[in-house]
Image: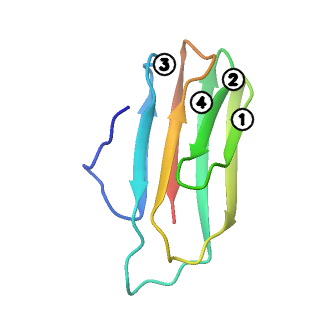
Amino acid sequence: MSCDCKNCGDHRNFVVTDFSKKRVDTLIPYKNKTYVSYFIKVKGNVNDTIKIQMVNYGGHYSIPPGEIDTLLNADYYGKDTLIWAFDPYRATKGKLKIEYGL
Protein backbone atom coordinates (compact mmCIF):
# COMPACT_ATOMS: atom_id res chain seq x y z
CA MET A 1 0.00 0.00 0.00
CA SER A 2 1.19 3.49 -0.75
CA CYS A 3 -0.04 7.03 -0.37
CA ASP A 4 1.01 9.81 -2.74
CA CYS A 5 0.61 13.27 -1.23
CA LYS A 6 2.04 15.31 -4.11
CA ASN A 7 -1.50 16.55 -4.78
CA CYS A 8 -3.17 16.19 -1.36
CA GLY A 9 -6.59 17.68 -0.79
CA ASP A 10 -9.93 16.91 -2.37
CA HIS A 11 -8.58 15.57 -5.69
CA ARG A 12 -6.07 12.97 -7.01
CA ASN A 13 -5.04 11.80 -10.44
CA PHE A 14 -2.45 9.19 -11.35
CA VAL A 15 -1.46 6.65 -13.99
CA VAL A 16 -1.22 2.93 -13.21
CA THR A 17 1.24 0.78 -15.18
CA ASP A 18 2.49 -1.35 -12.26
CA PHE A 19 -0.22 -3.84 -11.30
CA SER A 20 1.82 -5.58 -8.60
CA LYS A 21 0.56 -3.55 -5.63
CA LYS A 22 -2.36 -1.62 -4.22
CA ARG A 23 -2.47 2.15 -3.94
CA VAL A 24 -4.30 4.07 -1.20
CA ASP A 25 -5.30 7.74 -1.47
CA THR A 26 -7.02 9.99 1.06
CA LEU A 27 -9.34 12.79 -0.07
CA ILE A 28 -9.89 15.52 2.49
CA PRO A 29 -12.76 17.97 2.00
CA TYR A 30 -11.97 21.67 2.32
CA LYS A 31 -13.87 23.34 5.19
CA ASN A 32 -15.27 26.25 3.18
CA LYS A 33 -16.20 24.35 0.02
CA THR A 34 -19.62 22.91 -0.87
CA TYR A 35 -19.73 19.30 -2.10
CA VAL A 36 -22.62 17.34 -3.61
CA SER A 37 -20.90 14.21 -4.97
CA TYR A 38 -17.64 12.32 -5.35
CA PHE A 39 -16.41 10.97 -8.68
CA ILE A 40 -13.99 8.39 -10.00
CA LYS A 41 -12.84 8.52 -13.62
CA VAL A 42 -11.07 5.49 -15.09
CA LYS A 43 -9.69 5.49 -18.64
CA GLY A 44 -7.33 3.11 -20.42
CA ASN A 45 -7.03 -0.64 -20.80
CA VAL A 46 -6.38 -3.58 -18.54
CA ASN A 47 -6.10 -7.34 -19.07
CA ASP A 48 -8.38 -8.41 -16.18
CA THR A 49 -10.74 -7.11 -13.48
CA ILE A 50 -9.65 -4.34 -11.09
CA LYS A 51 -11.33 -3.04 -7.95
CA ILE A 52 -11.61 0.41 -6.45
CA GLN A 53 -12.65 0.36 -2.82
CA MET A 54 -13.89 3.03 -0.43
CA VAL A 55 -11.81 1.80 2.50
CA ASN A 56 -13.47 3.69 5.34
CA TYR A 57 -17.03 2.71 4.27
CA GLY A 58 -16.51 -0.77 2.84
CA GLY A 59 -18.04 -0.25 -0.61
CA HIS A 60 -16.24 -1.13 -3.83
CA TYR A 61 -16.49 -0.99 -7.60
CA SER A 62 -15.38 -3.90 -9.81
CA ILE A 63 -14.27 -2.83 -13.27
CA PRO A 64 -14.08 -5.52 -15.98
CA PRO A 65 -11.13 -5.99 -18.35
CA GLY A 66 -10.70 -4.39 -21.75
CA GLU A 67 -10.89 -0.78 -22.92
CA ILE A 68 -12.25 1.41 -20.13
CA ASP A 69 -13.65 4.92 -20.22
CA THR A 70 -16.00 5.28 -17.28
CA LEU A 71 -17.22 7.76 -14.71
CA LEU A 72 -18.49 6.57 -11.32
CA ASN A 73 -20.13 8.94 -8.87
CA ALA A 74 -22.43 9.14 -5.87
CA ASP A 75 -23.74 11.64 -3.35
CA TYR A 76 -21.19 13.17 -0.98
CA TYR A 77 -21.76 16.24 1.17
CA GLY A 78 -18.26 17.08 2.40
CA LYS A 79 -18.33 15.96 6.00
CA ASP A 80 -15.94 13.00 6.01
CA THR A 81 -12.51 12.20 4.68
CA LEU A 82 -12.73 9.50 1.98
CA ILE A 83 -10.05 6.83 1.64
CA TRP A 84 -9.88 5.13 -1.78
CA ALA A 85 -7.83 2.04 -2.62
CA PHE A 86 -6.93 0.95 -6.12
CA ASP A 87 -6.64 -2.85 -6.11
CA PRO A 88 -5.21 -4.52 -9.23
CA TYR A 89 -7.14 -7.61 -8.13
CA ARG A 90 -6.68 -9.99 -11.11
CA ALA A 91 -5.06 -7.52 -13.53
CA THR A 92 -1.36 -7.88 -14.32
CA LYS A 93 -0.87 -5.45 -17.20
CA GLY A 94 -2.36 -2.43 -18.86
CA LYS A 95 -2.35 1.33 -18.49
CA LEU A 96 -5.03 3.24 -16.59
CA LYS A 97 -5.52 6.92 -15.88
CA ILE A 98 -7.46 7.25 -12.64
CA GLU A 99 -8.89 10.40 -11.10
CA TYR A 100 -10.64 10.71 -7.74
CA GLY A 101 -12.42 13.90 -6.78
CA LEU A 102 -14.89 15.41 -4.38
Amino acid marked by disc 2: Thr
Query: What residue does disc 3 label?
Result: 19
Query: What residue does disc 2 label?
Result: 49
Which of pointers 2 and 4 lies earlier in the amino acid sequence?
4
Local crowd at mark 3 within 10 Å, few (<14), some, or many (≥20)?
some
Q: Is residue 87 left or right of residue 66?
A: left
Local crowd at mark 4 within 10 Å, few (<14), some, or many (≥20)?
some
Q: Is residue 14 left or right of residue 101?
A: left
Which of pointers 1 and 3 lies earlier in the amino acid sequence?
3
Which of pointers 2 and 3 lies earlier in the amino acid sequence?
3
Q: Are marks 1 and 3 in contact (CB under 8 Å)?
A: no
Q: Are marks 1 and 2 in contact (CB under 8 Å)?
A: yes
Query: What residue does disc 1 label?
Result: 62
- Which element type, helix, strand or loop, lies under badge 4? strand
Q: CA distance from mark 1 to mark 3?
A: 15 Å
Query: What residue does disc 4 label?
Result: 44
